[in-house]
Amino acid sequence: MNPDVLDLARLQFSLTAGGHFLFVALTLGLATVVAVVQTVATAGRKPLHARMVRYWGQLYAINYAVGIVTGIVMEFQFGLSWSGLTHFAGNVFGASLAVETIVAFFVESTFLGLWIFGWHRFNRWVHLATIWIVTLTAYLSAYWILVSNGFLNNPVGYRTEGGRLVLDDPVAVLANPSALLAFGHIVAGALLTAGFFVAGVSAYHLFRRSPEWEFFARSLRIGVFLSFPALMVTAAFGGVQLAALRTLQPMKSAVFSQKSAEIAQIQADMVARFGPGDYVPSEAWTRGGGLVMLLSFALMMYLTFAGVILACFKKVVFRFRLWHLVLMAAVPLPYLAMISGWVFREAGRQPWVVYGLLKTEDAVSDLSPGAMRASLIVFTTLFGLLVVLNAWLLARHARRGPVDPGLGRDDRDDRDDRDGPEDQNGPEDPADSLPATRY
């Protein structure tokens, strides 16, 4: 295998997978926030809660729409750049990827469409059910992806036939501790990301003395009070995963802990088992990613703990502009923690793509350096444009505030406007401003 092709293929997958992960984190967490707020709006039927559903739901829909494109593009790489992996282990980890595709692109997307276009058409409880189905299928989608990734990190439930892996024990694959622990970690991290996002956007409007002060004060509290427990759960699952590494991937654990004698011993054991080679992952990426993750966690812990206390005082929520600036600046922190944690997880298992079974250099497709370089340029450019587009759309709609968001807009309002001024038909009924889902 040409080392240039290997390096380019690894760089391409890391950039595209990391870029896609940025969308997933916010989508998964924000869907949960929207579903919970809509539940409150449906039961309480308060106009403020209904407006919060429309505003935060629109930001969620934007992030989902752009993110789904990155997911489609990223999966092309398995056949394009990693044919050795799909040939050797596709019978095992490919099944969960297929199920994830069905869940995400058929069930989740279908019900998201029903939720988006079902305003003013469905009964309010039916409409609420659609967003909860979207949220639950998003969790299922994340789970199936992590089943595949968990197998790569800790292969279980397989047997070998003709030099290829074949699924032997589906229960072992589905209950793989590497997948289950990562799933809990990712879900909590996604809620943390959404909490920081909601708090940061709300702080921006409060900092600018928005007339929608009540709207964003409540939203800020939602973000702050969500972030602290989400951070604790994320840290708990992360701690359990670190402890499990000594059994599942002892080399990664030794490199992160900088135990030179243990590294040398494990290297010698692996040479004896698998033949000559360097089985020590990059310390810069492995240890560096882990340390950045832990430092980000420490900073977020102080911010969320202080935030829970500050959010209990109304005057602080409305007037503490320095805190508003801190919340705005802190929005990228969960992204930094999750990406660095992903780097630690993936870089730390090198040189294996399927731990202990298939080396990364044996999984790359037989491509020329020129073809791989062209692929890298195309994929990176496309992902870069999508990330910029998503950031621009989110910032644009977040800055506008809850002023007539497109999501949930009733076409009957436009017809009423064309009929003439409001005073021709008498005073406006406050109930007319409520969504037709009758919150």
Image (tube, rainbow, N blue to C red):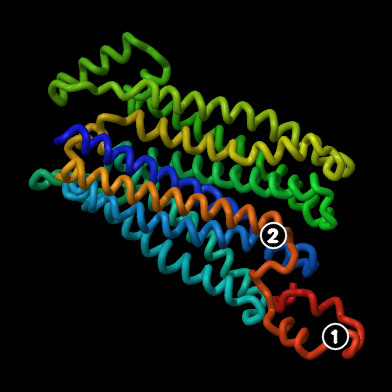
- Amino acid type for the residue under numbered disc 1: Pro
Looking at the image, how many numbered discs can be counted on the residues? Answer: 2
Answer with left or right where residue 424 lies relative to residue 255. right
Place of residue 437 in the rendered image (x, y in percent of width and height, measured from the top left): 69, 76
Residue 6: give x, y in percent of width and height.
23, 36
The three-letter code of the residue at mark 2 reads Val
Read off the residue under disc 2.
37
Write the residue at 41% across / 68% down: 106
Which of discs 1 and 2 lies nearer the camera? The answer is 1
Residue 155 appears in the picture as rendered: no
410 or 375: nearer the eye?
375
* Disc ID at residue 305: none
The one of 382 and 45 positioned closer to us in this rendering: 382
- Residue at position x 87%, y 44% from top? 314
Is residue 22 among what the camera can see? yes
Q: Which mark is residue 421?
A: 1
- Labels 1 and 2 touching (C-beta < 8 A): no
Q: Position of residue 31 (x, y in %)?
A: 58, 57
